[in-house]
Amino acid sequence: MNRVQLNAGVPLYVYQDGDNLDDIQEPIAFVVSKEGILIKRANKYYTGYQKVQGIDLLGKVENDQQKAQYNFPKLSYQVFEEIKSFFQYIYDRDQTEATILLYHNEETGEWTGIAPTQENSGGGSDYKIDDKTKEHIPEGFKLMGSIHSHAGMGAFHSGTDDNDEFNFDGLHITLGNFNSNVSNSCRYIFGGEAIKVELGDVLDEVPEQENKFPEWWSKQASKKTYTAVQSGYFHGRQYAGWNGHYPNNNFGNPSVKKNEAIRLLPGY
Ligand SMILES: [Zn+2]
């Protein structure tokens, strides 16, 4: 184990897979591990490792120093408008939600929307990045966020959205009210933390040209069909195997596999 001697006189160990805590001889020691910082306390009667909240021996990082700074590239307004027009098309065609993933090329600064294969309903958008999706992702582009529609409902980040997005670093926009004036809600997610932002903060300038989404997006989206709706719940609350976009719902389907965490920065 890597050992660091702190000024305060207590050693700090950096724990890695394969290390053994029994190798630590000192009665008091800090251990930095996947679980956070642990403190070893050992005496005649007790030896144990406890999670550390505050360490009086160490200096305090003031809140203003902890303030996050982000330097996220502005999303192309043109791409945003294409996506909005696609959601409107899907709403008019199917009365459902839909999802477009945001890909960015760091070299050229370009953005492009990618429609993942998706099954949508009025209360949810179930998507996957399968081979059919991957063939559309241009060389050099990296997944940097998502935009999804809430069909006729307002734009907010639902419990389902939290599940989908907290493991997915980047820009996440919800657009709603496709039955009237489109509303939006935007946030960045970094390391599982959300930073609420305004649409005007995340877009670059307004272009002149008309924005029409690519034809292939519409072929990726299909309307979800339900075989049975159980009785006893109001509309939308009891679709078997479907985790919809209702606020604070507890109807998540544990068999739905969550995506691997998508992290823009290594080490989370
Ligand atoms: Zn949502």
Image (tube, helix red, strand yellow):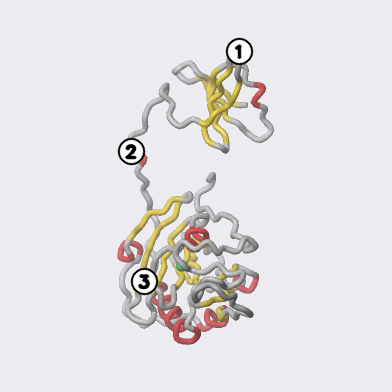
Relative to 154, is 107 above or below? above
Residue 44 badge: 1
Q: Quadrant of residue 209?
A: bottom left
User: In what quadrant of the picture does the N terminus appear?
Assistant: top right
In this rendered view, identify the residue nearer to me: 125 or 211: 125
- The earlier-in-sequence mark between 2 and 1 is 1
Nearer the observer: mark 2 or 1; the answer is: 1
- Residue under numbered circle 2: 63
132 or 192, which lies in front? 192
Q: What percent of the width, then of the height, locates residue 108?
A: 45, 64
Q: Is mark 1 within 8 Å of ligand 1?
A: no
Task: Mark 1 and mark 3 in contact? Answer it, CB < 8 Å.
Answer: no
Which sits earlier in the primary sequence, circle 1 or circle 3? 1
* Percent x, y of residue 140: 54, 63
Residue that badge 3 annotates = 77
Three-letter residue code for mark 2? Asn
* Foreground: disc 1 or disc 3: 1
> In terms of image quadrants, where is residue 210?
bottom left
Q: CA distance from mark 2 to mark 3?
A: 34 Å
